[in-house]
Image (cartoon, helix red, strand yellow):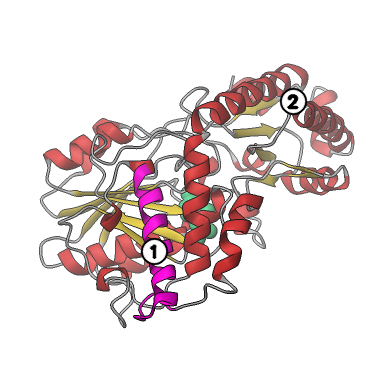
């Protein structure tokens, strides 16, 4: 099997599993208790908090563990709105955010928030001038993702942070895809809140964190005990936290070398797919791009059938509608970068991982070539194109 869906989730590293195991068995104490068994759990959490804070230049006490990236995103938005709604009700975000942000914004709109969803350009980049123009005295929060999970585009986070700071507006970033893939420093980038998730960095599922800069006063998310400095109650997921800390430490230590290798493989894959498959288009920015992300649209092909054939060939990947699986709506991200429905439907996302090899990439490209051709041979649209009745949309509109 060749796993090229690391943006959906990653394999938990064996070292991470090993680090977690004792906290399921002999070290099962509740960190809030006072005997020494509990102290072991507490120490383990403190260690993980420091390991994670170190990756983004934060202080350990600014890291609040959550049950994942979605919860961290929900917290940042809902609790900011609740705290500041007396001051203003305006939130600025983008059209290409993860649903954990977009659906939370829609929910807040029902509670009286006004949300600006910024457009992005054809590469998925936010326009800084548009951001500036959207700011009003009512603006309480800017939430813009660090890097997009579908097309891999990395946003100008430092510039956005500077603008937020100038206007005294809180800045949150969903960094679930960027954490340990791109160097992040919350002070240099003027980030007030940041979301991340364990299972995207070879850590366990069901654990994430929200970084909240010291002094930022937003509401607590879960009420109950005094855990997470009284802001997110509930007995801690000790094994999950330990695994997350270990995964962050490992992924941070290997970041430079791993991402350099990924970029080489990514660009090799992009080059081969562009050169060897006609009527194909790379989605996302060519260089301002996550090291492990490849996203293509192939004309005259349905993404879903591509995935089924790839599965037959032992390749796991994802298409532009996988995120809202069950629905046939094309991805909101692909529509936001200006793709028409037909082209958005024929899209394929391949996300490399720490152990992806050149052989994996070449095998996948060979298979994709073959499968795209087979799908086209069965397509009535392709038949019309070959008969000269229609033109290729990609060749005429997107090249
Ligand atoms: C995966 C992902 C999330 C959700 O994280 P979970 O831990 O699965 O809840 C949020 N935002 C982005 C950009 C993601 O890629």
Identify the residue shown where x is 71% and y is 32%. 298
Identify the residue under disc 2: 358
Q: Is residue 125 left or right of residue 329?
A: left
Q: Residue at x 34, y 32 (%)?
A: 156
User: Which label sits in the foreground, 2 or 1?
Assistant: 1
Can residue 280 be seen here? Answer: yes
Name the element at disc 2.
helix
Could you say which disc has been placed on residue 370 in the image? none
Q: Which residues are magenta?
A: 30-54
Tell whether 11 sits left or right of 61.
right
Q: Is residue 194 above or below residue 55?
A: below
Q: Was residue 48 drawn as part of the magenta stretch in this picture?
A: yes
183 in relation to 34, above or below: above
**Residue placed at 31% from the left, 68% from the top?**
228
Instruction: Please tell me which residue is depicted at 36% across the width and 60% down the height of the picture.
Output: 46
- Seen as rendered, the residue at the extreme front is 36
Q: Main secondary structure of the magenta part?
A: helix
The part of the image, by quadrant, that contains residue 157 is top left
The quadrant of the picture occupied by the C terminus is: top right
x, y (%) of residue 19? 57, 57
Q: Percent x, y for residue 80?
A: 23, 62
| Residue at the spot of label 1 | 43
- As for residue 22 lying within the magenta part, the answer is no
The residue carrying pointer 1 sits among few (fewer than 14), some (14 to 19) or many (20 or more) residues within 10 Å by Cα, namely: few
């Amino acid at each position: 099997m060749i796993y090229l869906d690391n943006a959906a989730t990653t394999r938990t590293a064996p070292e991470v599993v090993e680090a977690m195991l004792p906290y399921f068995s002999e070290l099962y104490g509740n960190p809030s208790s006072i005997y020494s068994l509990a102290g072991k759990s507490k120490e383990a959490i403190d260690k993980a908090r420091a390991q994670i804070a170190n990756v983004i230049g934060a202080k350990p006490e600014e890291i609040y563990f959550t049950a994942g990236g979605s919860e961290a995103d929900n917290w940042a938005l809902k609790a900011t709105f609740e705290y500041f709604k007396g001051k203003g009700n305006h939130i600025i975000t983008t059209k290409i955010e993860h649903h954990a942000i977009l659906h939370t914004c829609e929910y807040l709109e029902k509670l009286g928030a006004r949300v600006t969803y910024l457009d992005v350009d054809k590469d998925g980049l936010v326009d800084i001038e548009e951001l500036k123009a959207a700011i009003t005295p009512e603006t309480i929060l800017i939430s813009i993702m660090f890097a997009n999970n579908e097309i891999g585009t990395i946003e100008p986070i430092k510039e956005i942070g500077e603008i937020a700071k100038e206007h005294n507006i809180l800045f949150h970033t969903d960094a679930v895809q960027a954490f340990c893939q791109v160097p992040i420093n919350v002070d240099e980038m003027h980030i007030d809140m940041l979301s991340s998730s364990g299972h995207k960095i070879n850590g366990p599922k069901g654990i994430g964190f929200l970084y909240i800069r010291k002094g930022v006063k937003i509401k607590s998310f879960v009420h109950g005990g005094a855990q997470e400095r009284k802001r997110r109650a509930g007995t801690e997921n000790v094994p999950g936290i330990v695994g997350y800390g270990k995964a962050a430490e490992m992924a941070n230590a290997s970041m430079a070398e791993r991402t350099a290798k990924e970029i080489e493989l990514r660009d090799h894959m992009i080059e081969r797919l562009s050169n060897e498959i006609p009527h194909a288009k790379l989605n996302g920015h060519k260089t301002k791009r996550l090291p492990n992300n490849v996203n293509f649209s192939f004309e005259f092909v349905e993404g879903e059938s591509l995935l089924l054939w790839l599965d037959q060939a032992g390749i796991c990947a994802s298409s532009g509608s996988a995120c809202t699986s069950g629905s046939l709506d094309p991805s909101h991200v692909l529509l936001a970068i200006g793709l028409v429905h037909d082209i958005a439907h024929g899209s394929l996302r391949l996300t490399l991982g720490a152990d992806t090899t050149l052989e994996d990439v070449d095998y996948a490209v060979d298979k994709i070539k073959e499968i795209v051709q087979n799908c086209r041979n069965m397509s009535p649209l392709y038949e019309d194109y070959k008969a000269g009745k229609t033109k290729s949309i990609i060749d005429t509109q997107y090249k």
